[in-house]
Image: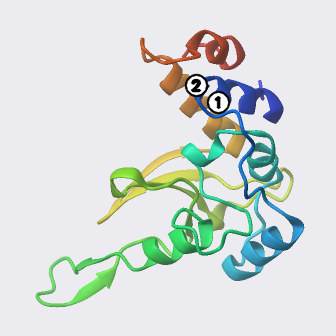
Amino acid sequence: MTIPIAELARAYDALHPETTDPWPFPPTASSIRRINETLSIQLPASLIQFVSVSSACHHWLASLGEDYDAHHHILRMTSRARKHRRRALGVQGRWEYVKPASFIPINHGYDDDYDCLDKNTFDLSTGEYAIGYWAPPRISGGFQHTFPDYMASKIRAWAEHPRATGRATALSIVGRV
């Protein structure tokens, strides 16, 4: 059962009651076009809708607005993540870039790990990408098939914490595991 995006946003925002003002840099047609062109991607409509209606989305997700120089803008985060290098396995002295080329980070990357759209998994029928986990140097996995599945899973996990603010509201929307 897919939960409507507006309901997912309501559940997420319930976990962040301190944030009631709308995000000052919502996505615009211009910013989405620039992101899509720069990253050679078509951002999922569900992601764009979520960040357009959630007032707390900036606590977790990359900015999709016109704040291009912001630390947590999707373009800056993708550029930073692309620069992660580690010593090549089995080759002394050689360095390699370790982020899978098809991964586009969509969350802030706390603790230097990211949830990423995988450009290789675009589904024409849904307009969605699978979302995978990536942590340098070479750890990846934990795929969700769509952005709504990803957010429902995250909200469920956060709301299960006994001291989570707004947990009853969030769980009433996304359900328990």
Q: Vertically, is 117 above or below 141? A: below
Q: Quadrant of the C terminus?
A: top right
Q: Position of residue 58 (x, y in %)?
A: 61, 48
**Residue 91 lies in what quarter of the image?**
bottom left
The answer to which of 162 and 71 lies nearer the viewer is: 71
The secondary element bearing badge 1 is classed as helix
Residue drawn at (15%, 80%) of the image:
90
Q: Position of residue 87 (x, y in %)?
A: 20, 80
Q: According to the image, label 2 marks what residue?
A: 15
Q: Quadrant of the N terminus?
A: top right
Q: CA distance from mark 2 to mark 1?
A: 5 Å
The amino acid on which the numbered mark 1 sits, given as a three-letter code, is Tyr
- Report crowding for label 2: few under 14, some 14 to 19, many 20 or more residues within 10 A (C-alpha): many
Mark 2–mark 1 CB contact (< 8 Å): yes
Q: Position of residue 174 (x, y in %)?
A: 67, 20
Q: Position of residue 21 (x, y in %)?
A: 72, 39
Residue drawn at (73%, 71%) of the image:
41
